[in-house]
Amino acid sequence: MKRRALSPARRFGIIFILSAPSGAGKTTLYNGLREVYPEIELSVSCTTRGKRPGEINGRDYRFMSDAQFERLKRRGEFAEWAEVHGYLYGTPKIPLERCVRAGRDILLDIDVQGARQIKKACPEAVSIFLLPPSLPELERRLSARGTDGKDTIRRRLANAQGEIGEIIHYDYFVVNREVNEAVRVLSSIVDAERARISRVNEWRLEPLRRKMRRKSDGQRN
Ligand code: 5GP
């Protein structure tokens, strides 16, 4: 088996924030991105909303009561939290900090309020806003999902218009017209952010220098 070359640079893990109005196709993109970068961790949020069919507690969300959520909030266990579509959502702080310290990248699927809080506490986090191709298409996708009632869909569409106005506070935007194309754009953002010199906190250039020295010595002889 071929050994992978050691990375010439060490850095902290990058927090990638992905926000989108619900129905913009975030989950599909998430899965597409995970196929390209299986090493990127996914943050599992806590929420007070009920479980949808197919969702698994601990994988999709940690589902909990209002009282449990309040307790965690009081103990300062959230890196950010917000009320979204009438329910509470929060990102647990400990797993996030652990990933960053260990140099592992982590992806947060959070709303615009949460994105603001994370960027304020952690300006080096990378925020990406996912746009649906159009509002009618967003409505079509929400209805096709078949998991939410008419009132919920109406509320989510109204929220979407407000959320889209927040795009100016993000670092990047991606239009989800076609999944593969959107995953490609997302991947270039991940690659570029990983290659930023300003993120490096330790260089390991000696093996590379040694190889170069050996090569130039060989050419001289
Ligand atoms: P859903 O209930 O459809 O899974 O998510 C609804 C919205 O809540 C989405 O915009 C999603 O990004 C957002 N959300 C999910 N987890 C969190 C979280 O931990 N914090 C914040 N602020 N928003 C979240």
Image (cartoon, rainbow, N blue to C red):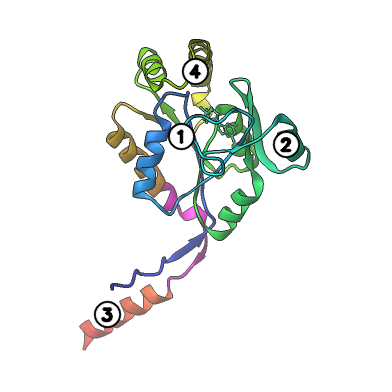
Tell me how far mark 3 sits from mark 2, CA to CA.
64 Å
Disc 2 to disc 1: CB gap under 8 Å: no
User: Whole-percent x and y of residue 183?
Assistant: 33, 38
Is 39 above or below relative to 89? Answer: below
Of 58 and 117, which appears nearest the observer?
58
Q: Looking at the image, can residue 195 be seen?
A: no
Residue range in magenta is 192-205
Is the shortest distance between ligand 1 and the CB of mark 2 under 8 Å? no
* Closer to viewer: mark 1 or mark 4: 1
* Label whose residue precedes the other's in the sequence (1 or 3): 1
Residue 197 vertical placement versus 59 (above, below): below
Residue at 71% from the left image edge and 35% from the top image edge: 69
Horizontal and vertical percent for residue 162? Answer: 53, 16
Amino acid type, residue under disc 3 in the picture: Ser
Front in this rendered view, residue 93 or 13: 93
Query: Which label belongs to residue 160?
Result: 4
Which amino acid type is marked by label 2? Gln
- The Cα–Cα distance between marks 2 and 4, rounded to whole angstroms, is 28 Å
Residue on which the image places disc 1: 54
Which residue: 39% across, 46% down?
34
Q: Which residue is mark 3?
A: 216
3 or 4: mark nearer the eye = 4
Q: Residue under circle 2? A: 68
- Provide the secondary structure element on which disc 1 rests: loop
Q: Are marks 3 and 2 in contact (CB under 8 Å)?
A: no
Task: Give residue 184's position: percent from left, percent from top.
Answer: 31, 40
Binning the other alpha carbons within 10 Å of mark 2 as few (below 14), some (14 to 19) or many (20 upward) gives some
